[in-house]
Image (tube, coloured by chain):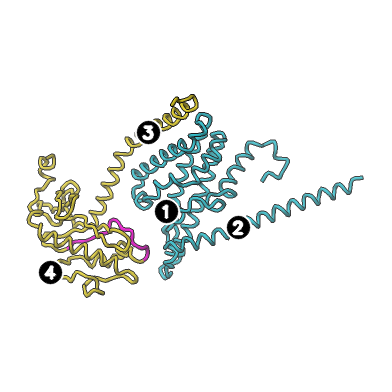
Amino acid sequence: MKVDRGQWQMIIALLVVGVICTLLLATTNIFTRAPIAQAERQALMNALMQVLPKHENDPIRDTRNIILAGDKKPTNFYFSRNAAGTINAIAWQVTAPDGYNGSIHILMAVHPDGSINAIRVTGHKETPGLGDGITKNQSWLDSFGDKSLANANWAVKKDGGDFDQFTGATITPRAVVKAVKKGLSMYASLSAKLLSSPNKNTSEEAHAK
Amino acid sequence: MQNNANDTNSVPDLQKGEIFANGFWHNNAIFAQLLGMCPLLGVTTSAENGFWMGAATLLVLIGSNLTVSLIRGAIPANVRIPAYITIIAAFVSIVEMGMNAWMHEMYLILGLFIPLIVVNCAILGRAEAFASKNTPINSLVDALAMGSGFTFALVLLGGIRELLGQGEFFGFDIFGPSYPDVLMFILPPGAFIALGFILAGVNIINRKMKEHKDQQAVALIQAQTATAEVQP
């Protein structure tokens, strides 16, 4: 098949448009890469600030990756330490796969003894006005404070547990309670390993590795 | 519009004004063409979301209209649609990266709707129907008009839904704490119902404008016949 002049024109026109657009995108990528990383770091920082107690270290750098049983991707654990360098809380993200509308992502922070410091929902697609109480209902979020596997019944009240459901939305809080409980059970089996993690803010070599 | 014969000596200005009036109102992507329904109904749970969705679309429109107009002679007719889509997709990606970098929270809220601007047929429609046939300046005016008209529609629907659904406007409490939030307006059915009332309102305004114009025309003809009769 012979390519005539008109066809060459089409090929060249599309090629030029494609190359110019690609260059434009590559340039934008160069300029936005650092601000995007910074914005994501800031978002994580804001979320961590809300769940962690008062700390003297930088929890974003003081982390440990562990691949949990049954998971493919590693989970990031963020350590919060007091002035003496002792861990006063550990934060990590858990996912409730059984929300009313897809997965709910929760950032939870627990004290070394396995009781909760605070939880925050960092991502969800629940119904506005009903299920989104998991982000807006502060007293409900506060009801998780200091709860542990030992001192609470981990279910919504409708199922005979200690946690409120919302009017018109039981599935959403049920999923959150279940995911947080699972996170606590996981912590119980891993706490010795996690609590022995080195302080990366003081030992720079450990971070470099 | 152009019914005043005395204005013909200021044609360039009049045309720009006409392009803007057409894009913003008479040919509005939402009110007149009912295009771009997906972002319209999807993100307008609040006036602020609607505003930023509209602003992102406006930026893409400006970029695509200008570029398409600048290269309008160089693209063979057979491959113009793939070329336009490539250009639009590039500008959408640029806007997406920019929002991710400098408006991270809004980027997370709007989520998938930003990449979906690529398939907003209002944008390809302007490239094909206007920018490919007009000068860059006129295409820029058209993009500004279309984009701000689209933003206006999104803010209007978002504002109504936020006001009725949460008693707020742009996050400011309007109706006070005792207002019983009408949840339905935040949910998808409320978007359709509110849009229906907005379109009805737009039709009423358009009919009133047409009646007014007709009356003016009738008055003009009567005045002309009156002067004709007086003359001997």
Q: Amino acid under label 3? A: Thr
Residue at the (25%, 63%) spot, across then down: A176
**Pointer 1: residues within 10 angstroms few (<14), some, or many (20+)?**
many
Q: Amino acid under label 1? A: Asn
Q: Is residue B38 above or below residue B190?
A: above
Do badges 2 and 1 share one subunit?
A: yes
**Pointer 3: residues within 10 angstroms few (<14), some, or many (20+)?**
some
Query: In the rendered picture, chain A carries what hue?
Result: yellow
Element type where label 4 sits in the image: loop
**Pointer 2: residues within 10 angstroms few (<14), some, or many (20+)?**
some
Q: Disc 3 to disc 4, how far (Cα)?
A: 57 Å
- Give residue B167's position: percent from left, percent from top: 44, 64
- Give residue B74's position: percent from left, percent from top: 50, 29
Q: Chain of mark 1?
A: B
Was residue A167 drawn as part of the magenta stretch in this picture?
no
- The stretch of residues the image draws in magenta is A116-129
Q: Nearer the viewer, residue A28 or B34?
A: B34
Residue B49 numbered mark, or none: 1
Q: Amino acid under label 4? A: Ala
The residue pinned by badge 4 equals A150
The chain letter corresponding to cyan is: B
- Look at discs 4 and 2 and give the one toward the viewer: 2
The residue pinned by badge 2 equals B203
